[in-house]
Every structure is written in C-alpha cells, then in structure tokens.
Amino acid sequence: MTPQELASALARILTELVAERGADIAITEQDTQLERPKNREHGDWSSNAAMKFAKRLGTNPRELAQEIAERAAAIDGVAQAEIAGPGFINLTLDAASAGETARRVVEQGEAYGRGDALAGQRINLEFVSANPTGPLHMGHTRWAALGDSTARVLRAAGAEVTSEYYINDAGAQMNKFGRSVLAAALGEDAPEDAYPGEYIQALGRRVREQLPDLAELAGTDREAALEQAQELGYQLQLAEIKDSLERFNVHFDVFFSERSLHAAGDGGAPSPIAAAVDRLREQGHVFEEDGAIWVRTTDFGDDKDRVFTRGNGVYTYFAADAAYYLSKKDRGFGEKIYLLGADHHGYIGRLTAIAGAAGDDTETDITVLIGQLVNLDGARLSKRAGNIVELDDLLEWLGSDALRYWLARYPADSPLALDGEKLRSRSNDNPVFYVQYAHARTCAVDRNAADAGLDRSAFAPELLTHETETELLGKLQQYPGIVAGAAELREPHRIARFLEELAAAYHRWYDNCRVLPLAGEQIGDLHRTRLWLNDAAGQVLRNGLDLLGVSAPERL
C-alpha cells in the first residue's frame, strides 16, 4: 500500500464521518496527506487530519482521531491505528502490505513514480537562452541543469512540457559579434568594442575557410561581407552551444529565434512584433506619448510603463519580449515558465505585466523563477574565451554527472559555492558518488545472485520484517509523492535529497540483511524476496537519477 492509497482511504473515511454529521465540507486527498514519523515506534505513517477538521465538526481532535482510527484499522493492509498527542493518527502497515511495494516497483519499472498530478497541463519552460555570441560558461550551467531537471520532473508528473531556448540573434550584440568575426576572418585588428577571446579568432578562421572569397567581397562590398561573416559565425557558434548542451545531457525541444519575431508573415502579413502592439491595443493597454508607443504595464504591478516603439520607430527589447510571450500563448501553452539568472530580477514585473496585458491570469499563466549565482572553487578561466569559465572545460574537468547532480540538489534561489575537488572525489562525502554507489551495489548483488543461482521466482513480502527493510520499503513508498511534490513546487532538488536518503536506507539494509545465502546455506524464499527488494531499490535510484539527468552506472 502506497502513502497515496492510504491517504485516499483516509479521505473516504473522513468524508463518511462528515456526511454522518450532516456537515457541508469537501474532503480531498490533500487534506489527509501522510508524513513519515521520525520515531519508527510511532508507526509507518502519521496523519493530522483529525486536528484539521475537529473544530469545523464541533468535536474534540482526539475524539475525531479515535473515530478515524477505528475505521482505518479495518483497511486491508493496516496492522494498527493508534492515537498520539493532541490527535495524531499513527498507522502501521502489516509486513505483507508494506513488502508488496517491492513487487510493484519492479513490475512498473521506469514508470514507477510517474503520475498524473499535472495531467492536462501544457507548459512552456524557457531556460539558458544565452546570447549566441560566445561559448556557454559557468553562469549558464546552473540554469541548464535546473531547467532540464525541472522539465523532466514536470513530465514525470504528467504535464506536457516544451523546453525552449530563446536565441537572442537580433540587435546590437549580433552586429558587434559580426564585426568581431569579420575582422578575425580578414586578419584585421579587432574593433575597439570587439568580443574578446581566442574563440573569435577560431571562428574567424573557420569562416575564412568556408567563405574563401570573403576578402575579395569585403574589398568591393563591406556590408555584404559583414552580413555573410556574421551569419556564418552565428551558425557555427550556435552549433557549438547546442553541442555543449547535449554533452551536458540537456535537451531542448525548441530553439526559438528572436529574428523570427521581426520577419514579415506570409503574404505580406505584419511581423509578430508589429502585430503584438495591435493585439495589446485591443486589450486596451496601449497609449502614445512623445511620439512613442507605450504599454501601460503599471496596471499589472510593474514599476513603470514600458516603451514598445520609440519615437524613431525602433522596437525596444520589451517589444520583443511581448511578441515572444504572445507566440507562446498562440502555441497553446497554459503556463509559461521563465528560469532567469540572478541579474534579471527586473524582468519579473515586466513579464508578469505582459501576461496581464495579453489577457492571461498572472497567477497561473506565468511563472518567473530567479536563480542565484554559482561559483566553483578551483575552476580555471577558459583559454579560448579568456575571461570566463567555459562549460566545456567544466565538463572535461568534472564530468556531466557531478555537475548535473550538485547543481540540481540546491534550491534555485540559494547562492551556491561548490568545491571542485569534492565534486571529483569518490567518497561518501560526495553525494553523487554516494547515490551512484548505492545503485552500483544493487547491480553487484544482481550479478552475484545470478552466479549463485538465486532468482525472483518466489515473493513472500510478509518475510520482510527487519527494521531496515521496513525503513527501505517506506522510502520506496514515498517516491511517487516526492516526484509529485517536486513537480508541483518546481523544485527538482527534492529528488536529489530523497535519493540521498534512499541510498542511506539501502546501505543500512545491505549491511544488516543478506540477500545471498551463506556458504552451504539453502536458497529460501527470504533470499528471493530480498532480491526483489534489492532490485526495487535499484530501480527507484535509476528513476530518480534520470530525472536529474544523471547516469546510474552498474559499476564504479
């Protein structure tokens, strides 16, 4: 029996008691959610439902708890229901019911832990969105790890998620990039405002190789040469960014080009950015002043109204942001999640205001998550880029697994300082190693079991009575709820912390309960059943690590 099933049973009991009293109170499973008692003597699960509803039902919490407990004791699989303190209900499952979790996990495999808590939701999750004018650096790693893990967790909870990278490929920074690449390709001195770093020189060499007539073109038509060099340099740099992300095990469904917002539509239709102001005007939030076109974003809590089009007819960054939001709305997304860096706090108000001006619900249709900075002791500046720590160098030094895990195990809004040598260590002080080692142990048990002729041909869950088995089974039962909670709160770090607790429970069980028979000992149903439990632990470790984009090695 899972905590969710037990919570559902308690909700039904409480609904019956409410009806018997003639009260008009709706009961949901959220009202009867269970907690794992810190003291194992207090049972497997605890509920405070009686204390929540006693006053509304005009009764004493302990009296209501007693009524709930009496009926809960009759639930199939519940061995005991007791009252504690002011009205807690402590529930103990019988060994067979608790042990059934092992079979359920093994039989469901990769599907165990996945649910439908967010079924029906179409979510657009935008993250990283670094300018395509240089390599990805350490400042992008946290958003990449958190964004991809968040997408995985949301999907595991049943949501339909599109992970999206917004390519800022329009505007002044692209023109600066183009001038830098062209100068490098032609062997000229870099412009005063050029992007620094050897990577520009490397791009210039590649552009010159692929455009052998570039110098001749520059001599006759400098603007045409600049256009070609900028476009090719951009495509080469974007390809490098995509490659770095793939090696970091970060996947995007959509790479959305800002340039597409400025491009005219089919049949001479206005561009999305030109159409956006008309759509916002229809909502009644556009006005003109001093020759400029404004959006009255203060109506939706922004600190000031925003300029959409300047007096000279040039669109602002806000205009592109508005057109981009409307694009997401037009593509049928309900919630639009933006994961932004620490220096983007000012975007919360303007993005929320855009949602309001577009007619969306600012409470449910837009979420802006701000991540804090990360620094990594021992990280070296890039030789290619000169003044940054490149993602590629971090991957070479630490590997994807260590980076992904450590970056995902902390809340996004907490500043993060990491020790590079600790990330590289193969010890129990390194959480990713500790969790991966637990998984590798489950695989080693499987290999040794096969050599000993031990299989899962029998399953007797009532035999799993050791206290470490009860603890391990309890952890396995919690996993679906952990996934649902992490998805609901958009907090993948909850998965990492759970995996560390699960690994600890597994290691304790491994040290106390033998799966393999001793020399000369006959293989029995206890050995076979413990093999089920071993495999269930390995499956949940794999499932959880996958949600973090981290591998589950069979050997370490």
Image: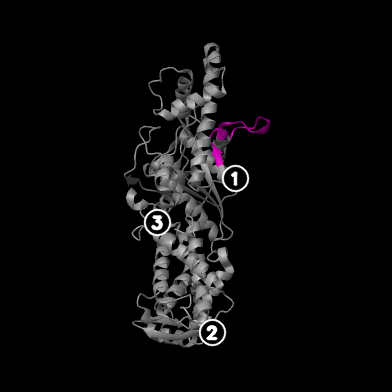
Horizontally, residue 305 falls left or right of residue 209, namely left
Residue at x 42% of width, y 67% of height: 502
Decide: few, some or many residues near mark 2? Use Cα within 10 Å; few <14, some 14-19, many ≥20. few
Task: Reply above or below: 414 against 256.
Answer: below
Stretch in magenta: 255-271
Q: Position of residue 207 (x, y in %)?
A: 52, 24
Which label's residue is closer to the chain start, 3 or 2? 2
Give the structural element (helix, strand or loop) at label 2: loop
Task: Give the amino acid at mark 1.
Answer: Asp
The answer to the question of whether label 1 and label 2 lie on touching residues, with beta carbons closer than 8 A, is no
Q: Which residue is mark 2?
A: 76
Task: Reply above or below: 460 against 242.
Answer: below
- Spatial distance from mark 1 to mark 3, Cα to Cα? 34 Å
Task: Give the amino acid at mark 2.
Answer: Asp
Task: Give the amino acid at mark 3.
Answer: Arg
- Spatial distance from mark 1 to mark 2, Cα to Cα? 49 Å
Which label's residue is closer to the chain start, 1 or 2? 2
Give the structural element (helix, strand or loop) at label 1: helix
Q: Which residue is mark 1?
A: 330
378 within the magenta span = no
Q: Position of residue 69 (x, y in %)?
A: 45, 85
Callout in the foreground (1, 3): 3
Residue at x 41% of width, y 73% of height: 509
Q: Can you see residue 413? A: no
- Which is nearer the eye, 442 or 100? 442
- Which is nearer the eye, 273 or 25? 273
The quadrant holding residue 349 is top left
Q: Which residue is mark 3?
A: 409
